[in-house]
């Protein structure tokens, strides 16, 4: 797959301005795309040749994850190949895919089966990759729910092997983008980068101290009520994911549904407009944002107490027709600005 990168420019000065900063202090900013979303990466405090090499490696790492998680049944799409072996013997899988599957399964268990990697059949019924002809019947939902148990996916880290139960289907749309951000950050660190910003759609990571030494500024969801100010947080070796109820919705017979499924009921969640999660890893932030939109703030807060490190979470509760109610978990400890 070819990589298209647009260098957005840096350190541009007029002829009358002061001399340009040394290359080691000049930020490099690029834009690309993956997962149907915009990718933005900024690198600071590195000479431009090294920064360009690092940024290309980071974009390729994101694209590698994109290739890994395609659910189609081709041998060069590892997740699709695993889906094609459902009901058969365990097969060897790519180590990166195994890491992703293991973390997604952890969240399946943590959420008591509400959000995990084995909900592919349910997501197919609701039209994740191809439009659904109609709202799923209860019979179809019941059958798909029976194939979405966390333990339908068996993993063996020692042998790099995975096994999928008969009739089950994997889907990693709720986990892969955050994992891709983490992979980009890992690659940047390997390339000697210590100060960088990575964003893929609504998932972002601030590596290091940022432009002014206190982290990378990230914008939070905008509230329609003018009395509630926009806020921003500073990410310092942290990830932030934001999930909206109207993000890439399922559209069936003109009706719009959130593109998340509670795998216990087989139905999309209701009552939550936005969830924002700040924590240490991109995959954890994305997975929690999805799970907490499904679980809601009451069940979600009960389950969050057992996590370490503790994430910071904000829910906007509502149905999209009025001013949302704000609920938070560990949010007051963050440094925020108006």
Image (cartoon, grey):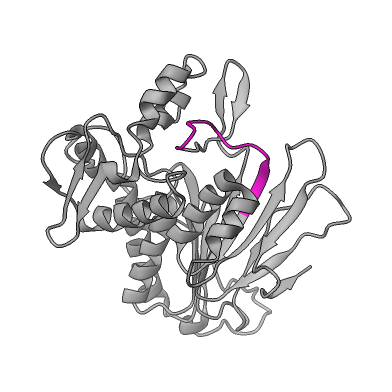
Q: Nearer the viewer, residue 292 or 40?
A: 292
Q: Identify the residue at horizontal 26%, vertical 45% (top origin).
A: 153
Quarter placement of the C terminus:
bottom right
Residue 2 in picture, x, y percent from top left: 31, 47
Is 200 placed above or below 26 here? Answer: above
Does the magenta-highlighted stretch encompass residue 294? no
Is residue 240 visible in the rendered structure shown here? no
Is 73 placed above or below 95 here? Answer: above
Q: Image quadrant of residue 332?
A: bottom right
> Which segment is the magenta one?
263-275
Does the magenta-highlighted stretch encompass residue 270? yes
Q: Nearer the viewer, residue 105 or 82?
A: 105
Q: Is residue 232 left or right of residue 150?
A: right
Q: Image quadrant of residue 84?
A: top left
Quarter placement of the N terminus:
top left
Q: Identify the residue at horizontal 40%, vertical 49% (top origin).
A: 108
Q: Nearer the viewer, residue 326 or 149?
A: 149
Residue 43 in picture, x, y percent from top left: 47, 72
Q: Main SS of the magenta segment? A: loop
Q: Is residue 251 left or right of residue 170?
A: right
Is residue 242 visible in the rendered structure shown here? yes
Residue 149 in picture, x, y percent from top left: 34, 40
Is 217 placed above or below 320 here? Answer: below
Q: Identify the residue at horizontal 68%, vertical 79% (top origin).
A: 16
Residue 150 in picture, x, y percent from top left: 34, 45
């Amino acid at each position: 797959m070819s990589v298209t990168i647009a260098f957005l420019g840096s350190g541009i000065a007029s002829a009358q301005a002061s001399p340009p900063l040394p290359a080691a202090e000049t930020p490099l900013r690029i834009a690309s795309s993956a997962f149907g979303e915009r990718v933005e990466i900024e690198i600071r405090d590195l000479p431009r040749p090294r920064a360009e090499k690092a940024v290309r490696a980071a974009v390729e790492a994101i694209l590698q994850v994109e290739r890994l998680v395609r659910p189609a049944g081709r041998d060069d799409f590892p997740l699709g190949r695993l889906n094609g072996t459902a009901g058969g013997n365990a097969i060897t899988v790519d180590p990166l895919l195994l890491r992703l599957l293991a973390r997604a399964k952890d969240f399946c268990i943590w959420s008591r089966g509400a959000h995990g990697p084995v909900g592919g059949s349910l997501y197919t019924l609701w039209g994740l990759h191809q439009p659904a002809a109609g709202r799923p019947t209860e019979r179809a939902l019941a059958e798909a729910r029976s194939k979405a148990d966390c333990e339908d996916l068996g993993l063996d880290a020692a042998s790099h092997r995975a096994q999928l139960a008969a009739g089950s289907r994997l889907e990693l749309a709720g986990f892969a983008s955050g994992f891709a951000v983490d992979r980009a950050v890992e690659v940047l660190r390997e390339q000697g980068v210590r100060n960088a910003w990575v964003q893929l759609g609504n998932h972002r990571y601030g590596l290091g101290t940022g432009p002014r030494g206190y982290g990378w500024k990230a914008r939070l969801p905008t509230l329609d009520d003018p009395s509630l100010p926009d806020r921003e947080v500073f990410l310092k070796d942290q990830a932030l994911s934001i999930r909206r109820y109207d993000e890439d919705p399922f559209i069936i017979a003109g009706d719009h549904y959130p593109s998340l499924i509670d795998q216990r009921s087989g139905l999309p969640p209701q009552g939550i407009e936005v969830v924002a999660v700040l924590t240490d890893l991109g995959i954890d932030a994305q997975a929690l944002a999805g799970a907490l939109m499904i679980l809601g703030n009451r069940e979600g807060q009960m389950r969050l107490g057992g996590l370490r490190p503790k994430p910071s979470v904000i829910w906007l509760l509502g149905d999209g027709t009025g001013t949302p109610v704000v609920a938070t978990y560990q949010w007051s400890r963050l440094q925020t600005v108006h």
